[in-house]
Image (cartoon, coloured by chain):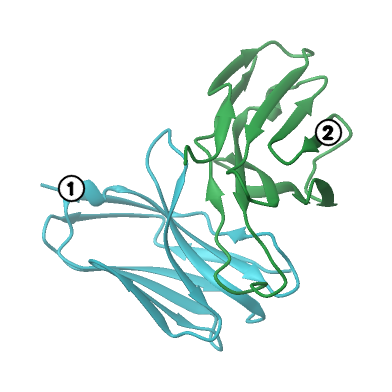
Amino acid sequence: DAGVIQSPRHEVTEMGQEVTLRCKPISGHNSLFWYRQTMMRGLELLIYFNNNVPIDDSGMPEDRFSAKMPNASFSTLKIQPSEPRDSAVYFCASSFLTILRQGRDYEQYFGPGTRLTVT
Amino acid sequence: KQEVTQIPAALSVPEGENLVLNCSFTDSAIYNLQWFRQDPGKGLTSLLLIQSSQREQTSGRLNASLDKSSGRSTLYIAASQPGDSATYLCAVRPQGAQKLVFGQGTRLTINP
């Protein structure tokens, strides 16, 4: 398996521009997570999906951020308009969760991340 | 609110030494605890996962322990090698949640 795939790997944009980050989870996984990593705050969960449905978006910083998962093999995280404080590494992770396994052997697999710089 | 703390923030040791990384969490109501490794500019690689009912897990030169009641976990690395240099992150999965709560990590440097 290719693992979790993210694109682009690096993005440099100007303040005010729209940014779209993409993620392809591991085939067969039914949960997908978006995290953000900064020096100041470390790794923080932004939002996660189960079976393509957003479950918890309490970590999304503000209305400028939105995430979609139109199907089981693709998700996007959009920032519009972008600001310099959005500069960070954004990670996507996926996992497989069943009722029988809930809370056990639950492992998230992370993608390589997208390094976003907003100037 | 669950909080995870890792001490020290950075550690530098000579090659060959055994070492221990520490992780503490404030709420013992967890499903499991994971240790990850992150290399510069790369994603996270899962090293070990300990379920709440377990006390430890081992993989090669790595051994992770969990004391849920005291809110502590340690990652023991035996016979350290320069290739072990990376940032090590601890994360817990709170009960009733799917998300992971991460510590800030320990940046480990093994000197040849």
Same subunit: marks 2 and 1? no
Q: Secondary structure at mark 2?
A: strand
Foreground residue among A59 and B54:
B54
How would you rate the neighbour count of disc 1 (Cα within 10 Å): few for under 14, some for 14-19, many for 20 or more? some
The residue located at (49%, 65%) in the rendering is B34
Where the C terminus of chain A falls, by quadrant? top right
The residue carrying mark 2 is: A66
> Measured along the vertical axis of the image, is residue A18 above or below residue B2?
above
Q: Which mark is residue A18?
A: none
Q: Nearer the observer, disc 2 or disc 1?
A: 2
The residue located at (54%, 70%) in the rendering is A105
Apparent side of residue B10 relative to residue B99 in the rendered image (left or right): left
Chain letter, colour cyan: B
Q: Which residue extends farthest bottom?
A: B69
The residue located at (39%, 61%) in the rendering is B8
> Measured along the vertical axis of the image, is residue B11 above or below residue A106?
above
Foreground residue among B109 and A53:
A53
> In the image, what residue type sits under mark 1?
Pro
Q: Are marks 2 and 1 in contact (CB under 8 Å)?
A: no
Residue A57 appears in the rendering: no
The residue located at (21%, 47%) in the rendering is B83
How would you rate the neighbour count of disc 2 (Cα within 10 Å): few for under 14, some for 14-19, many for 20 or more? some
Residue A28, position as x, y percentages in the image: 63, 49
Residue B106, position as x, y percentages in the image: 40, 55
> In the image, what residue type sits under mark 2?
Ser
The residue carrying mark 1 is: B82
Q: CA distance from mark 2 to mark 1?
A: 41 Å
Chain A on-screen colour? green
